[in-house]
Amino acid sequence: TKALVPILVLLLDVGGTLEEERRGVLVAQREFMSAGADNVLVNRNTPEELRLAVDMELQRSEHAAKWRAAAQRDVDEQLGKADEVAASGLFWQCVDRVFTGFPLMESRLPADLKHGTRVGHCVFESALGQGSFGKVYGATNLQTGTREAVKVISKSSIKSVKHVSA
């Protein structure tokens, strides 16, 4: 994770031709930033230019930190609203439109699926196992003809939208 205080790296006297210097600086920047640095500065001609570059980078870093914090607050707020909708039951009526690939919800299924029950393109055969969130059934996919393991999760066991979006 990133440090709370911005980490700046100053490269001094990179040397070589202009193209070699350019490549060297870009490699150094990539390596330092992958190690956690927020940015890499190249030595300026005068101490005043260097101070200005450092001050500008610190200001940019503070601005970016405020933006990230605001974005995280927005995400948390939206997830909270989504959890409220999920708790109201409205969420389940359109979950397949919210999450790509999420199957259409079947509202009238029994808690324990019997052999031969058809849901969508699958015909359920037998229960293979059970966990804390639901049961796993063996099923045949009528579109592909393949046998699949299908996890059936009770809506009541999902307390947050994070459980279906993770």
Image (cartoon, rainbow, N blue to C red):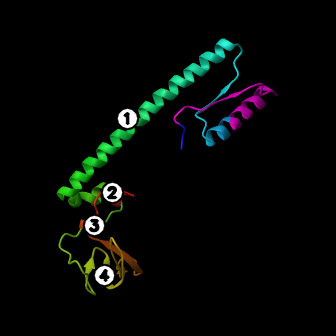
Q: Nearer the viewer, residue 139 or 30?
A: 30
Q: How many marks?
A: 4
Task: Tell whether label 4 touches label 2 (CB within 8 Å).
Answer: no
SS category of the residue bearing label 3: helix
**The residue under label 2 is which amino acid type?**
Phe
Is-magenta flag for residue 23? yes
Is-magenta flag for residue 115? no
* Rendering coords of residue 99 (x, y %): 33, 57
Marks 1 and 4, how far apart at CA:
47 Å
Q: What residue is pinned by disc 3?
A: 157
* Rendering coords of residue 59 (x, y %): 51, 23
Residue numbers of the magenta segment: 4-28
Q: Earlier in the sequence, mark 2 or mark 3?
A: 2
SS category of the residue bearing label 4: strand
Q: Earlier in the sequence, mark 2 or mark 4?
A: 2
Q: Residue 153, relative to residue 8: is it above or below? A: below
**The residue under label 4 is which amino acid type?**
Val
Q: Name the residue at 54% across, 44% down.
A: 1
Task: Tell whether label 3 touches label 1 (CB within 8 Å).
Answer: no
Marks 1 and 2, how far apart at CA:
25 Å
**The residue under label 1 is which amino acid type?**
Ala
Q: What residue is pinned by disc 4?
A: 123
